[in-house]
Image (tube, rainbow, N blue to C red):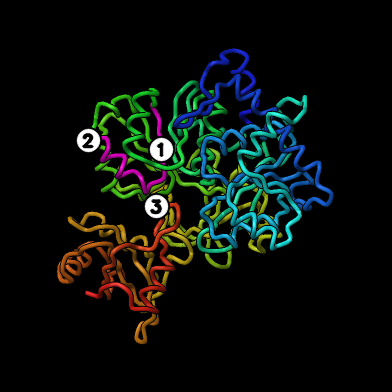
Amino acid sequence: MPFTQTILDVAAEDGRRPAIVGAEERLTYSELVTDSARVYAAAYQLHNVQDHPPEPAAETTGIPITAVSLTSAFHTSRIIAGLAGFRAVSATIDPRWPLDHQVSVIATTGIGVVISDSSELAAALESAQWAGTIITLADFQHLENTATGTEQPTRRDGAEPFLMMFSSGTTADPKAFLKTRQQYRDNYAVSSAHLEPLPGAATLAPGPVSYSLTLYALIECLASGGSCHVADGFDPIDAGRRIEAEAITRVVVVPAVLQALAGAARRDPERFAALELVVTGGANLSATIRSTFAAAVPDARLVSYYGAAEIGFIGDSRAGDGTLITIYDGIRVSIRDTDGHELPDGELGTVWIWARACSEGYVTATTDAVLVGSDGWATVHDQGRIIDGRLSLAGRAGDIVITGGHKVALPEVERAFETMPGLGEVCAVALPSRQLGTLVALVIEGDAPTKGELLAHAREHLAPQFVPRRWYTVPRLERTVGGKIRREATAQWISEEEGGNRL
C-alpha cells in the first residue's frame, strides 16, 4: 500500500504530525502506527476464533475480509488505514444502503468480520445464517485494548489485494471489486501529479468513507505524509470553523455540497481565506456552480476530476463549463460503438479506458458484468465523444435515448438549463411515446418559469431533437444517499404515477 511506508517514515521523523483528524478525535502518525497494530490484532483474533468462517471470495487469494459499516468517518478511517499494513482485505459498507444490499454483499463476498452498530444488520445476518462475526464499535475498541499480538505494519507486496470496494448500493445490487496495493500505488502516482495532496498539507474530506472520493482522499493524504481531516457529513458552518482552526488549505468534497460551501464562504469569508484548492469528483461541473464558487472563494482553485472507482483517476476540468476533460498523462481513452469498433472524433459512443490502476474485474460472486475486455481496456459504460483531443462526457449508457430517430444525451439537455435564471435543479428523463417511441421530458425541482419561457430558452440553446416535449415540477427530485439525482427513479415516478405538476 502506498501509504504504509510513508506512515512509518513520518512516524519516525515527525511523529507528532496529525494523520487522521475527526471533529473530536485525532491520531498523530506515531499514534497511528501503534493503533494499527491493535486494530489488526483485534481483527485477527475475531477471524481466528471462528470455527467455520465464511470463505472469502476467490479473488482475495484466501485473505480474510473485514468490513466496516459505521457512521463515524474517524473510526472507519483509522480501521481501514490500520489494516492496510497487514495481510488483510478491508471494505467499507455504507450503513445507509438498503438492508438487503448490505446482507447480500457480506454473504456473497465471504466477508468474515463486520464492525457495525446496527442491530437491524445483526438480526438480518443471523436470519441469513451468515457464519461470520458482527461486532459493535465499542466492543471492537475493547478488544483492541485487550487482544495480544506483536505484528507491526509493514510495506507489503504490490500484487497483494488489500481493499474491496463496491460500484453501487443505492439503486441496484452492488458489484464488488478488489484493489491490489500496486493498483493503488499507480493510482496515487496519477492523483499526486494533478490533484495536489502535498506533503504536510491539511485536507478536509467530509462525508462517508464508503464514498470512493472520501476514501481516495484519505489514502492520498497518508501516502503524501499529509493530514486528513474527516467528518461524518458535511456541515458548512463546521467546515468553515475547521478550515480556519486547522489551517486547512485543500478540501475534497462531492459536487452536491459545493454550493453550500460557497454559501458559507460568502457569509464568513475570513474563515476561508487560507483555502487554496477544492477538489471534487464528477465531471461536467456546471458553469453556474463554478462561477458561484469563484465569486465566494476567489483565491481558491476548483478542480473537478473524472474517474471511476474500478479504474482510477482519468482526467479533470478546471475552467469554463467543465464539459471538456483533459486526460491525464499515462491514461488512454477510446470511444467505441456497441460492436467494439473505435469511432472517429466527435461521434458519441462508449468510453473505454486503459490505465495501470484499473482493477482486474468484478468479484464474480456479485455479478457477471465485464469490466476489462480481452485487450486490457476497461469500461463502466460511460458515454462520451472526443473533441479537440479532450473528452466530453454524455452520461451513462442509460442516459442516451433515441427519440424520433435521433440520439439524445439527457445530461446535455440538463446542461442547457444551467444558465437559465431562477431555475432550480433539473433532471431530463425519457418517457414512452406512441409517435416517437421515446420523448424527452424535463423535471424541475421547486418553482419554475412558465412553459413558454422554458421552451424559448430550450430552442435557443438546444438542437430541435433535444428540446423537451413535456415539463414537470416536483417539490424534490429523487436522489441517492450521496445526493446524486436518480434519473431512472424520477422517470418511473413521472411515467407510472404522473407524479409532479405538469406544465
Image spot of residue 348 (x, y percent): 44, 62
Q: Quadrant of residue 80?
A: top right
Q: Which sits earlier in the primary sequence, circle 1 or circle 3?
A: 1
**Vertical placement of residue 463 versus 356, above or below:** below
Query: Vertical placement of 82 versus 503: above or below?
Result: above
- Start-end of magenta stretch: 249-266
Give the residue number, with chain letter if any, for mark 2: 267
- Amino acid carrying mark 2 in the image: Arg
Rendering coords of residue 351 (x, y %): 51, 56
Q: Is residue 390 above or below residue 335?
A: above
* Left or right placement of residue 22 versus residue 45 in this view: left
Q: What distance separates the C-alpha of mark 2 from that of mark 3?
A: 39 Å
Q: Secondary structure at mark 1?
A: strand
Query: Is residue 396 in sight in this rendering?
Result: yes
Q: Quadrant of residue 442?
A: bottom left
How packed mark 1 is, by other alpha carbons closer than 10 Å (few <14, some 14-19, many 20 or more), is many
* Secondary structure at numbered mark 3: strand
Mark 2 or mark 3: name the one nearer the start of the chain: 2
The residue labelled by disc 3 is: 387
Q: Position of residue 440 (x, y in %)?
A: 33, 73
Q: Is residue 256 magenta?
A: yes
Q: Image point 38% across, 43% down: which residue?
A: 317
The reply to whether the magenta stretch includes residue 282 is no
